[in-house]
Image: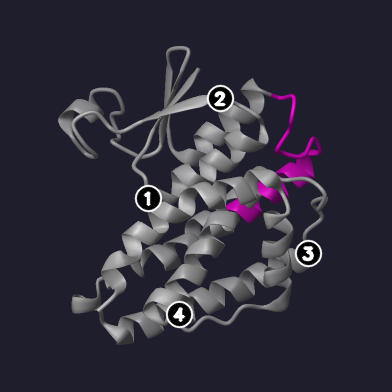
Amino acid sequence: MLTIYNVPVSTYTAKLRVTLRHKGLAWEELPPPGGYGSTEYKAIVPSGNIPAMVHEGLMLADSEAIAEYLNEAFPEIPMLPADLRQRAKAREFGRLHDTRLEPNVRALFPQVAYATRDMDAVQTCGAALSQSLKALELLLSHSQLPTDQLWLCDAGFAITFAWIEAMETALGVPVDWPAPVRAYQTRLQGFSAVSDELDFYRPAMDDYLQKARP
């Protein structure tokens, strides 16, 4: 049994669960002992990061490190290409999510609370999101990854797209969605691992966004 330490609204745990679902793996989820960032939790996970995994005595933190481990430990449903160059491009694709698109969404979290929201900051974040989605459009146009499979690099985008849509509605974030990015989002939602995770995760998103209301 895999053990995953998590807090309900964690975006990177949701990303990891897409991989777990697609590979058909069983896991249990536990809250961090003592709470997120506690000394008790850091005795198990020194970085204090969420998510973290324990599997047969091995502890790993960081969703990408965990996903790559799972891909090798349970290779029956591969989520990285066998070809060296395609594998490198898949990792490049995933890095666009982790280092550019997702941080643009994360920058909006301090603006969720209605009472302290700075609409100038919301507008700035919307522009940054639109720029990152434009970069994703360009990367998609050059992608050589087969589109009939779900890859590790896809999992984060599936969750982050849902957050962008939620932030558009709850905060009025102005976002320009390129048509190829919308098509990519639709394709990802065609995988049951993605659609099942979104159904599971949306209540946590909705609960977090309650404070966005006046």
Q: Residues under labels 2 and 4: Cα distance?
A: 37 Å
Identify the residue under disc 3.
Answer: 142
Comparing marks 1 and 4, which lies closer to the viewer? Answer: 1
Q: Are marks 1 and 4 in contact (CB under 8 Å)?
A: no
Whether residue 135 sits left or right of residue 83 in the image: it is: left
User: What is the spatial separation of the Cα atoms under label 2 and label 1, in whole angstroms?
Assistant: 20 Å
Q: Nearer the viewer, mark 3 or mark 2?
A: 2
Q: Which residue is mark 1?
A: 9
Q: Which residues are magenta?
A: 75-95
The mark nearer the N terminus, 3 or 2, is 2
Badge 4, how many Cα within 10 Å: few under 14, some, many 20+? many
Find residue 212 and report its horizontal and vertical position in percent.
30, 72
Mark nearer the N terminus (3 vs 1): 1
In 3D space, how far apart are the residues under numbered discs 3 and 2 (Cα atoms)? 35 Å
The residue under label 1 is which amino acid type?
Val
Which comes sooner in the sequence, label 1 or label 4? 1
Q: What amino acid type is highlighted by mark number 3?
A: His
Secondary structure of the residue carrying tag 4 is helix
Q: Which mark's residue is nearer the viewer, 3 or 1? A: 1
**Which class describes the residues within 10 Å of circle 1: few (<14), some (14-19), or many (20+)?**
some
Point out the tag, 2 or 1, that comes first from the N-terminus.
Answer: 1
Q: Which quarter of the figure has residue 203?
A: bottom left
The residue sitting at 16% across, 30% down in the picture is 39
Q: What residue did someone put label 4 on?
A: 126
